């Protein structure tokens, strides 16, 4: 974090001196639940958005990266003192991404694919989990007090928050595009 510009107020993370012991378990539980709530919100939003052709490549990455840290957003709104620093906030967002990825993997291997082969189960519980966890960590680095102020219409969105979100969405889109290309070419054939 030494590379942060000390004069850039947009990079100041919510950090309150009154953090209590119970804030840590509360933060972890909300991060886990936020990932689950995020997947529900992402499913509803993706269904409502229509345009299924580009949804996995463009729509899903934007919607999912915005929805996964739902629990972290709740912490920011209700218990901002629980967000102890930028790295801590990013780790909580990564936990949200991990819980989102676990629910998504379970849905794929139980509902989307009947009698999935072992390699597919292994795939669903490795690469996509790493993607969701890592991308959420990147988004979490941009969850700062400025983001809250932006949602309230009091400040412009910080370039760092915007760029971190775009980075995470881009990584997610490249991953989805690659997975679709491999599935269409027969490399990731689950039937």
Image: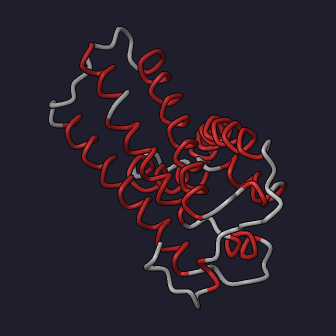
Image: 124 above or below 16 = above
Q: Residue at x 80, y 73 (%)?
A: 152
Quarter-of-image position of residue 38:
top right
Image: 67 above or below 157 = above
Q: Position of residue 56 (x, y in %)?
A: 41, 46
Q: Residue most toward the top?
A: 115
Q: Residue most toward the bottom?
A: 7
Q: Position of residue 63 (x, y in %)?
A: 55, 53
The residue lying toward the viewer, choosing from 4 and 78, is 4
Q: Residue at x 55, y 72 (%)?
A: 161
Q: Describe residue 142's horizontal placement relative to residue 34 as left or right.
A: left
Quarter-of-image position of residue 130:
top left
The residue lying toward the viewer, choosing from 75 and 169, is 75
Q: Residue at x 29, y 49 (%)?
A: 177
The residue lying toward the viewer, choosing from 67 and 73, is 73
Q: Describe residue 110's horizontal placement relative to residue 131 as left or right.
A: right
Q: Position of residue 76 (x, y in %)?
A: 75, 59
Quarter-of-image position of residue 125:
top left
Q: Residue at x 38, y 18 (%)?
A: 113
Q: How many marks?
A: 0
Q: Position of residue 47 (x, y in %)?
A: 59, 41
């Amino acid at each position: 974090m030494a590379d942060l510009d000390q004069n850039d107020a947009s990079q100041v993370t919510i950090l309150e001196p009154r953090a209590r012991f119970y804030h840590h378990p509360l933060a972890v539980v909300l991060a886990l639940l936020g990932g689950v709530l995020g997947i529900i919100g992402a499913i509803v939003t993706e269904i409502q958005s229509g345009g299924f052709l580009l949804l996995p490549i463009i729509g899903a990455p934007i919607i999912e990266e915005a929805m996964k840290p739902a629990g972290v957003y709740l912490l920011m709104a209700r218990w901002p003192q629980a967000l102890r620093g930028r790295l801590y906030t990013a780790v909580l967002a990564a936990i949200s991404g991990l819980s989102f990825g676990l629910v998504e993997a379970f849905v794929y291997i139980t509902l989307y694919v009947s009698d999935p082969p072992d390699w597919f189960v292994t795939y669903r519980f490795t690469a996509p989990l790493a993607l969701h966890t890592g991308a959420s960590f990147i988004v979490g680095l941009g969850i700062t007090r400025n983001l809250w102020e932006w949602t309230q219409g009091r400040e412009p969105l910080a370039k760092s928050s915007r760029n971190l979100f775009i980075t995470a969405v881009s990584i997610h889109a490249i991953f989805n595009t690659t997975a679709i290309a491999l599935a269409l070419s027969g490399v990731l054939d689950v039937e």
